[in-house]
Image: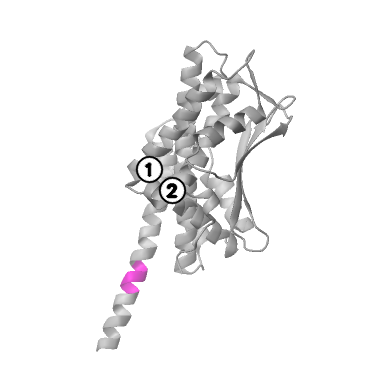
Amino acid sequence: NIVMRSTLPRLTLPYKLCRGSLADRQRLASRLVNKLFNNMQGGFKNGEMHVQKVQEYVDEVLPGAFNIKVRGGFDDSEFAASNDIYYSTFSQKAKLMTIELGTKKNKIKHTNLVDIMHEFRHVADVLFNPKYLVRNEYMVQEGLYTKKFDKLFDEIIYKVENIDSKASRSAAIKKVEHKVRKFLRGMSAGDKVNCLQDMRYSLESENFAYLTQYKVAKKLKKKHINISEDDLCKWHLDFMFIEKINLLKRIAFEVIQKERNKFARELLKKQN
């Protein structure tokens, strides 16, 4: 019962466009993000761009017709950008992916390219890694996105760590491991693996999104665009994404190995 569900074609690429190794797909996603960045660079007038123009640029670089919408109107000075996936009430299948932007009079500033490229990297990751969305759909359909899951992910997994030494990095990962193992207690092997893989996929995408954000910020600063110091930080390192990804992979492997050993013992018992 470890995930194999079909997803709506409007949010996924044909296999021939996203096949290859993980590294191959990551390169394709990076290429798509770079294409959008380069295309948008010359489209600003007086340092601003209308949200509808952003949508046109996004549609232009997508390799096909996809239900991906850019939304503005979030006139909140604290809100930069986000992305989300919306599901059909009836089929519980993904039907829409959005990039939601903080705007003023439905316009973005040149500096907002940092936020747009961060969110568009998530979109590219979903397009070139169909299993991300398949897993996401399965988690929704099976009710695995519980309050307990959200609390673990938001407060423990997707969290900047206070690290200043090798010892503090080790202590941070041990704390995360303890919380994850506590969360998994009493769950079936299938649910354990699905939750672990979903968290891992999320961190993989965030790692690339924050790395993209950092690279874009550096490029814009070279063009003398006033970039926030926060955007020039290596947040992907402060979140310890790689260490947490490796931890989640290790725990998932342990769960799978335990199930395999259990199956082998039962098979041997039957044969005897």
Point out which mark residue 25 bears: 1
What number of labels is visible? Answer: 2
Point out which mark residue 129 bears: 2
Q: Residues within 10 Å of mark 2 (few under 14, many from 20)?
A: many
Q: Secondary structure at mark 2?
A: loop
Q: Is residue 240 left or right of residue 85?
A: left
What's drawn in magenta, residue-wise? Answer: 258-262
Q: Position of residue 90 (x, y in %)?
A: 67, 63
Residue ID at (60%, 18%): 44
Q: Is residue 48 above or below residue 106?
A: above
Q: Is residue 263 left or right of residue 127?
A: left
Q: Position of residue 195 (x, y in %)?
A: 50, 58
Q: Residues within 10 Å of mark 1 (few under 14, many from 20)?
A: some
Residue placed furthest toward the left = 272
Q: Amino acid at mark 2?
A: Asn
Residue 170 visible from this viewpoint: no
Residue ID at (49%, 53%): 198
**Quarter of the image with the C terminus in it:** bottom left
Asked if the residue at tag 1 contacts the one at tag 2, i.e. Cβ–Cβ closer than 8 Å, the answer is: yes
**Is 265 or 210 nearer to us in this picture?**
210
Name the magenta segment's main secondary structure: helix
Residue ID at (69%, 29%): 78
Q: Is residue 217 above or below residue 181?
A: above
The quarter of the picture where residue 25 lies is top left
Q: Amino acid at mark 1?
A: Arg
